[in-house]
Image: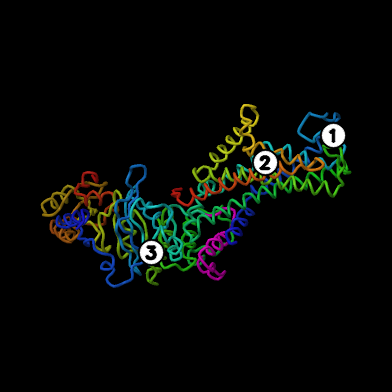
């Protein structure tokens, strides 16, 4: 077992998320075809290790979440997968093709973007798609119409991209990734900069691609986004995988909830007597923020009601940041920071 | 061919393409109109080569324009065009968009280099045609007197003028190649353009000092006047062929370096 795997096993014993043991790619895919895998993938920049012996496998039909905070090595990894930068060590395998050695063959099966999608501003979206699509094979006008429709840009397809908003460029980035019907779609923070409706649309589109059997590799720093659309995920930090497994198992064991009540002191006292309750703090005029295992919430409500304390609502606290989750994973407490 | 078609379409969709060409087209007209309106005619030895002869024969306008532009403006246009090839696309982020497609990096670079040279070539055609047109309209044309004192018919003069432009284009292709090579090692097109111009100016300076005469045959910048030989009778072809050989050497080496660097370059922007 590798050093990383040992680290993961220890965290599982301590009550943190159960995770898959690192294992050979074929086993990880349980008989499904491996669409993308990395093998000891490493990248150094002037003495700084951005990606450190990364091994991961993405199976056919996966909507695979690639999570990590800024600087975790996500974008560097994607650049290596897309053949934009050369690994210091190791390689990428896309279907039967190794990257960088067989980059051209590999990229015929891939569509995607890294960072902010960029286009020729003086041209229309349609012409951009025509140019980029033809670099990957034959692309018909009907297909261009189809992808523009999928990303909600049908009505602006003939407008110059120079006049597009950030969100429209993100959508066009997805359109150009889809244009040649690749087996693998790689999206680097596709909802970045989108308004709530745009985020919802893009997430629904990714889910739909997954339902159609397209393999999607989705980079994000938003845990809840990955939860909503992905079936498997890895979490990276400092160029290494910290956690890997089904998305349902990536949630932290403890969560923060807010109790809306007018009697904060008494509610705090009652909850403080319960076993398993972590931090309790006032959060606004009529709100109490409590950290506890999510299985404990019904019991907390029962106790408050039994004591005659009105509970108007129980809501999840602000979405737990990935950074907090990382701190939990690596054994540090985030509770102090929360308060 | 698909690389070339794509690059040509991209260039034709950029507004600066037409601004650059319009500027080059305007220069021979400005030069000719200024001379026509001037009360004093430039004397022999004053102003750029051929300038003093324009008033007597409009056929000298395209030659004077070429001689005038060859020392700074055409190198500037060539440097800017070449520097945008890789670094410019890196700045706008479109380089990564291109290279996430299954395309050969060498193919992309060579197509871009070719289209950059083509752009300068079209610019030269505009200068030449504009110059001939302006000269004909404002001063008229007649058989052209050569350096050797002989006369060239109008058709022959135009043919040799076209040849002079073609030779100059190969010279400018050296500058484009230098800019393309620098463009592969930086992600700033301005840095590549300035770097190219600095190197061209240094090479031109080296050509000015007799101490460095031993270098002169190998400096492409020292060959920018070799097309003047076309206006001698009989034409001494040797320096012209030598110039083309020197130009070709620089082009092959610089484009080779650019391809080698670009094939292994990490695309980070």
Where is residue B11 drawn, in percent x and y? 62, 53
Residue A126 sits inside the magenta stretch: yes
Q: Please name the residue that numbered disc 1 is placed on.
A: B37
Where is residue B168 drawn, in percent x and y? 70, 44
Residues at marks 3 and 1, CA–CA distance in whole angstroms:
69 Å
For the C terminus of chain A, the image quarter is top left
Q: Which residues are magenta?
A: A119-147
Where is residue B258 drawn, in percent x and y? 52, 47
Q: Please name the residue that numbered disc 3 is placed on.
A: A94
Q: Earlier in the sequence, mark 1 or mark 2?
A: 1
Residues at marks 1 and 2, CA–CA distance in whole angstroms:
26 Å
Q: Nearer the viewer, mark 3 or mark 1?
A: 3
Left or right side of A140 for B148: right
Circle 2 — which element? helix
Residue A63 sits inside the magenta stretch: no
Residues flagged by tags 1 and 2 on a common chain: yes
Q: Please name the residue that numbered disc 2 is placed on.
A: B74
For the point 50% across and 48% down, which residue is it?
A: B90
Disc 1 vs disc 2: Cβ atoms closer than 8 Å?
A: no
Where is residue A320 drawn, in percent x and y? 28, 52
Q: Residues within 10 Å of mark 2 (few under 14, many from 20)?
A: many
Disc 3 vs disc 1: Cβ atoms closer than 8 Å?
A: no
Question: Which one is nearer the viewer's eye here, A88 or B223?
Answer: B223
Circle 3 — which element? strand
For residue A102, the mark is none
Residues flagged by tags 2 and 3 on a common chain: no
């Amino acid at each position: 077992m590798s050093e990383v795997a040992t680290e993961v096993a220890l965290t599982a014993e301590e009550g943190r998320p159960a995770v898959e043991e690192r294992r050979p790619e074929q086993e990880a895919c349980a008989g499904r075809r491996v669409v993308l895998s990395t093998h000891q993938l490493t990248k150094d920049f002037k003495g700084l290790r951005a990606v450190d012996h990364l091994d991961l496998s993405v199976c056919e039909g996966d909507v695979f979440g690639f999570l990590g905070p800024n600087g975790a090595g996500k974008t560097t990894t994607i650049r290596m997968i897309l053949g934009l930068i050369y690994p210091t060590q190791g390689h990428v395998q896309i279907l039967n093709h190794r990257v960088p050695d067989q980059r051209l063959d590999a990229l015929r099966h891939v569509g995607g973007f890294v960072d902010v999608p960029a286009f020729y501003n003086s041209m229309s979206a349609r012409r951009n798609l025509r140019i980029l699509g033809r670099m990957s094979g034959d692309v018909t006008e009907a297909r261009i119409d189809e992808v523009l429709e999928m990303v909600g840009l049908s009505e602006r397809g003939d407008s110059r991209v120079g006049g597009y908003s950030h969100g429209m460029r993100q959508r066009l980035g997805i359109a150009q990734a889809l244009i040649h019907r690749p087996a693998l779609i790689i999206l680097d923070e596709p909802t970045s900069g989108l308004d709530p409706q745009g985020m919802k649309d893009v997430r629904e589109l990714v889910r739909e691609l997954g339902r159609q059997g397209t393999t999607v590799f989705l980079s994000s720093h938003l845990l809840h986004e990955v939860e909503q659309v992905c079936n498997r995920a890895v979490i990276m930090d400092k160029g290494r995988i910290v956690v890997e497994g089904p998305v349902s198992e990536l949630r932290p064991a403890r969560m923060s909830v807010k109790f809306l009540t007018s009697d904060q002191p008494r509610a705090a006292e009652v909850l403080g007597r319960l076993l398993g309750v972590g931090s309790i703090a006032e959060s606004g005029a009529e709100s109490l923020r409590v950290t506890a295992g999510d299985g404990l919430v019904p019991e907390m409500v029962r106790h408050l009601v039994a004591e005659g304390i009105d509970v108007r609502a129980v809501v999840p606290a602000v979405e737990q940041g990935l950074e907090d989750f990382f701190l939990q994973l690596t054994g540090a407490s985030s509770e102090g920071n929360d308060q | 061919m698909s690389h070339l078609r794509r690059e040509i379409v991209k260039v034709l969709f950029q507004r600066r393409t037409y601004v650059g060409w319009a500027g080059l087209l305007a220069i021979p007209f400005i030069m000719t109109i200024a001379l026509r309106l001037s009360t004093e005619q430039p004397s022999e030895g004053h102003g750029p080569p051929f300038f003093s002869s324009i008033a007597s024969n409009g056929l000298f306008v395209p030659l004077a324009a070429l001689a005038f532009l060859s020392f700074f403006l055409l190198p500037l246009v060539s440097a800017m065009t070449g520097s945008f090839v890789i670094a410019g696309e890196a700045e706008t982020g479109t380089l990564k968009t291109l290279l996430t497609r299954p395309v050969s990096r060498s193919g992309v670079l060579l197509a871009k280099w070719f289209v950059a040279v083509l752009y300068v070539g079209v610019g030269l055609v505009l200068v030449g045609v504009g110059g001939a047109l302006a000269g004909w309209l404002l001063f008229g044309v007649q058989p052209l007197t050569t350096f050797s004192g002989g006369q060239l018919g109008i058709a022959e003069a135009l043919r040799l003028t076209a040849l002079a432009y073609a030779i100059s284009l190969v010279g400018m292709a050296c500058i484009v190649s230098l800019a393309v090579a620098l463009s592969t090692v930086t992600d700033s097109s301005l840095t590549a353009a300035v770097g190219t111009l600095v190197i061209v100016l240094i090479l031109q300076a080296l050509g000015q000092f007799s101490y460095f005469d031993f270098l002169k045959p190998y400096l492409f910048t020292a060959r920018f006047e070799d097309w003047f030989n076309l206006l001698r009778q009989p034409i001494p072809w040797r320096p012209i062929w030598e110039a083309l050989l020197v130009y070709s050497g620089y082009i092959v080496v610089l484009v080779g370096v650019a391809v080698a660097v670009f094939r292994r370059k990490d695309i980070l922007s």
